[in-house]
Image (cartoon, grey):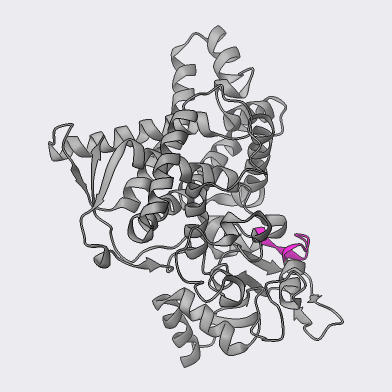
Amino acid sequence: MAAPTTSMIRDALDYQKNPAKFLLHKSCSSGSSIFDINLAGRNMTVMTGTCHDDTCASSKSSCPHRELLKQAMTLPERILSARDAVADVGFLYTLGANNVYRGTDFHKRCIKDYMNENGDFNGGLLNALRESYRVVIEAERFKQQQAGDNSISVDDLLNLVRLATLRAIVDSIEAATAAAAVLPAWISVPLILKPQDYGEIGPWLLKFRQQCDDGSLTLEVASEFVVGLLFAAAKNPAIASAQTLLFLILLGTDEHKSKVQTEAEQLAISSHSSSQPKRDTSTMPMSALRQSCYETLRLTSHSIGALRKVKEEVVLGSGTSHAYKLCPRQVVAVSHIVPSLDQRLWGKDADKYIPSREEWTVERARPDEYKFSTFSQGHHRCPGQSLALQIMELTISILLVDYEVTLQQKKEMVPGVCFERATIAQRKGNVPIYIRSR
């Protein structure tokens, strides 16, 4: 392989320093929604779906640059492969072939079946998350030898939320296993391992049992899927939850904070009931809490999100002046942060935290998946969007209602947002807090 050139190294260093700024600069300087980057030898063709042509109304669905991205994201797997791209960047080794090539489809079916039946996950999720925070915080309190009514010091808010979210998911799996282990087989098999409805055990274990019974899934593959589920369910939703709380504390207005607090209290009460009816939220006004979640997700979108590997040559926008040819083995990367910060799409305040912006408050102004692309687009749009948003809302509710969270630093000293890792943007350093049970 040829030695890296100065340009390659410079691109890699600039990207590492500030991925969002680097990609925005590349997009502007190239004057195109499609441009190539080389990160120390790894070539990628980046697509943004945005343009820098003043004569083009890029916020409209008819924009040719957006149409190119739409075409790419809806091409079949045999032409533009998400699975092969994910495998090539390392997930084949970290999560295994079953998770890369079969896991996402399995989890998508679990979520779809459960949501069709129940409407949301709130009841079980609230209890699991609430208990997880209690255990994690009490363990920290014990280490610090603090009485129950005193505040404790936590080194990093993001780590606390990640740990509690992961524990909530692991404990749900562990509790079902333990219940089956301590009961006689004649009870545990029909009631625990083969529940009659979702309310007894949850969608994933039920789906595991159904498919293991009919031979379409082995226990070994099911165990691999659990690992993939933990990785997918606990990572970005936990980071986004912590970021939502931080954005609210650091940048939220008093009026918005008050609305969120009221809604958090109502959610904590209403979600506590496991017998609540299925809710149709499609026509409901967006709550202040969800506005905060969406605005935070917009500002912390992946610098490089969706990845595709070209399997067959294809010409995007064939017959137009914007035609672009993709060749086999080419890697296509979709940037989610570039459209999120595009002033042509979001206005001159695109980089500001404004949860009351019309995209979240006015039904007709709601952005499509190419303007607000945090959950990706097309065939491989994130199947866990509804679950992630509910984890975020319930986490914020728990931290606002059950606990009092205060920063240890002055607001201006809190580390800024960092896009360096392949996740929702994190922070450039730890965010230490004090936390006390209410």
- Where does residue 196 sit, x and y in percent of width and height? 64, 17
Question: Which quadrant holds residue 168?
Answer: top left
Q: Quadrant of the C terminus?
A: top left
Please state if 250 lies on the left or on the right of 66 as rendered: left
Task: Give the camera-side residue of 358 and 231.
Answer: 358
Q: Residue at x 63, y 82 (%)?
A: 35
Residue at 71 percent across and 78 percent down: it is 57
Q: Position of residue 142 (x, y in %)?
A: 18, 35
Q: Residue furthest bottom?
A: 6
**What residue occupies the far front of the structure in this picture?**
255
Side (left or right) of 182 relative to 1: left
| Residue 374 within the segment the image draws in magenta | no
Whether 282 is drawn above or below 358: the answer is: above
Residue at x 70% of width, y 62% of height: 81
Q: Which residues are magenta?
A: 73-83
- Residue 398 vs 57, above or below: the answer is above
Give whichever of 54, 181 is nearer the camera. 54
Q: Position of residue 321 (x, y in %)?
A: 81, 86
> From the viewer's perspective, is residue 268 above or below residue 433?
above
- Tell me if residue 165 can be seen: no
The residue lying toward the viewer, choosing from 211 and 265, is 265
Q: Is residue 82 magenta?
A: yes
